[in-house]
Amino acid sequence: MNERLTTRSDYAIRLERVFRWLADHLDDTLDLARLAEVAAMSPYHFHRTYHAMQGETAAETVRRLRLHRAAVELITGELPVSRVARRAGYGSQEAFTRAFKAAYLVPPARYRASFVPSPTPKQTEDAMDTTTAFHATIRETPALRVAALPHSGDYINIGSTFERLMAMAGGQGLLGPWTRSFGVYYDDPASTPREALRADACVTLPDGKVPGGDLQLREIRGGRYAVTLHVGPYAELHFPYTWLYGTWLPKSGEEAAHAPSIEEYLNDARVVPPSELRTEIWLPIR
């Protein structure tokens, strides 16, 4: 391994420690000196290094992860908006509303109302209409060699695992124009306790490359898949899943294969707003 790659790998390992720490301390006040300490880097250079390697600041990473969690909490309807705002790190509901609207295009109360309707016939019908925009196509795909980083626990937190994956894969020289990003989901979140959920965060491998360290060599099953495209926040992915399994599959004449569901992430959450995220859901079929 040449010196340049060794240095890149060393920095990637340091940033991976930062992502792990951030995931475990998402509710803490952001302390760049503490993050520099976790990375074993000089506080004078940590911020620039992080931004240069990640394309966003540490504060922007935390803000993005907190707003994603807030969107999930708004959809579930379990917490008042004021509490969601505090958990997202905002001192006032007004500040949270401005930040959420900038990212998700609508204020949080309206976002919640679109998924948690009052029990009136018209609103219930409108809520059901959110599934009518989905379409599925059947696709034959070859098997894909991937570098995988296992994730355990609530699927909504897999974003932090992807941050770690990208740091490690970049440090090993595995990222490039060929890179595609996938999530492999082994359990049904509706029937499996959150703490027992299993998934893999994956990136495709260039020919001849084998991942090292905590990254594992895996293969995404080749064969037939029913594929639907979701455009919008990751927090809303359960809607296309419900349509694909509950509406499309029973009417399709197809049978699900004994294999996990797959998500392919077609653009980068660090670059585009949540409303423009494009995610394909692959349902394996026989």
Image: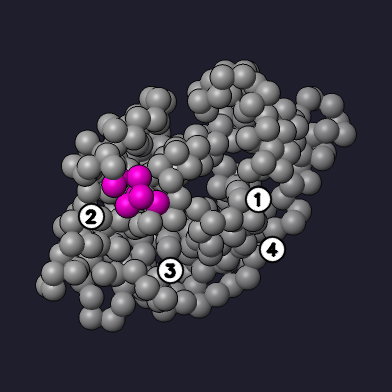
Kindly identify the amino acid type of the residue bearing the numbered disc 3. Answer: Arg
Above or below residue 18? Residue 53 is: below
The Cα–Cα distance between marks 2 and 3, rounded to whole angstroms, is 22 Å
Name the N-terminal-most of marks 3 and 4. Answer: 4
The Cα–Cα distance between marks 3 and 4, rounded to whole angstroms, is 22 Å
* Disc 3 element: loop
**Mark 4 — residue?**
135
The Cα–Cα distance between marks 1 and 2, rounded to whole angstroms, is 32 Å
Query: Does residue 239 appear in this view?
Result: yes
Kindly identify the amino acid type of the residue bearing the numbered disc 4. Answer: His
Q: Which mark is residue 195?
A: none
**Mark 3 — residue?**
180
Above or below residue 210? Residue 245 is: above
Tell whether 225 sits left or right of 206: right
| Percent coordinates x, y for residue 71 in the rendering | 59, 35
**Mark 1 — residue?**
275
* Disc 4 element: loop
Name the N-terminal-most of marks 2 and 3. Answer: 2
Q: Residue furthest right?
A: 122
Name the N-terminal-most of marks 1 and 3. Answer: 3
Q: Residue at x 52, y 53 (%)?
A: 269
Name the N-terminal-most of marks 4 and 2. Answer: 2
Q: Residue at x 76, y 53 (%)?
A: 132
Q: Are marks 1 and 4 in contact (CB under 8 Å)?
A: no
